[in-house]
Image (cartoon, rainbow, N blue to C red):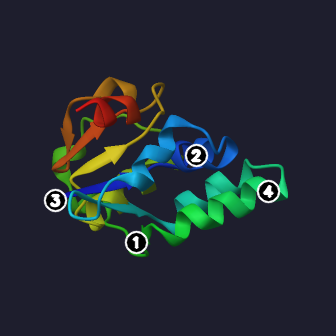
Amino acid sequence: MDRLFLDANVLFSAAYRPRSKLREFWEIPVERAVLLSSPYVVGEARRNLAEASQIRELEKLVEATSLVRQSAHRSDHPELAHVKLPEKDWPVLLMAISANASHLITSDRKHFGPYYGEYLGGILILSPSAYLAG
């Protein structure tokens, strides 16, 4: 079973546009995958949504997502020393590691794009479209 850690941009886009292809993540059978995220990530998505209807959509999506509340520490993962991420993205990767995620699903091509298709801390980094196509 896949353990998919969803980044804020995935949550944001799915809440922003209810007809978004990203809604397919919430249609994946529970036998195939569990959806994971964190309060940190949800907060980032929420801050970027302007309308009350979008925030309600986000809340519905979060209800069907398991939230991780504990993060690993960068110092616990010396194998990540080569990884170049902005400070705001480290909690995302570290929470995915804490959650024992199999995948980090992110649309952040600027920061995570160089790592698409690679394993960081044992987690496969993929774009949403790459995962859904697989």
In-front residue for pair 82/100: 100
What residue did someone put label 3 on?
1
Which residue is farthest right? 51
Q: Is residue 87 visible?
A: no
Name the spot of residue 51 as percent of width and height, x first.
84, 52
Q: Which mark is residue 14?
A: 2
In-front residue for pair 45/91: 45
> Which residue is at 40% across, 71% downward?
68
Mark 4 or mark 2, which is nearer the start of the sequence? 2
Q: Amino acid at mark 4?
A: Ser
Marks 3/2: CA–CA distance: 22 Å
Q: Bin the neighbour count of mark 1 within 10 Å (Cα to Cα): few under 14, some 14-19, many 20 and up.
A: some
In-front residue for pair 16/19: 19
In-front residue for pair 125/55: 55
- Pointers 1 and 3 in contact (C-beta within 8 Å): no
Marks 1/3: CA–CA distance: 18 Å
- Pointers 3 and 2 in contact (C-beta within 8 Å): no
Q: Amino acid at mark 1?
A: Val
Mark 4 or mark 3, which is nearer the start of the sequence? 3
What residue did someone put label 1 on?
68
Q: Is residue 108 visible?
A: yes
Image height check: is 39 above or below 51? below
Mark 2 or mark 3, which is nearer the start of the sequence? 3
Q: Which mark is residue 53?
A: 4
Name the spot of residue 112 as percent of width and height, x first.
39, 33
Marks 2/1: CA–CA distance: 19 Å
| In this picture, residue 28 sits left or right of residue 16 | left
Marks 4/1: CA–CA distance: 25 Å
Name the spot of residue 104 as percent of width and height, x first.
33, 47
Quarter of the image for the C terminus: give it.
Answer: top left
Mark 1 or mark 4, which is nearer the start of the sequence? 4
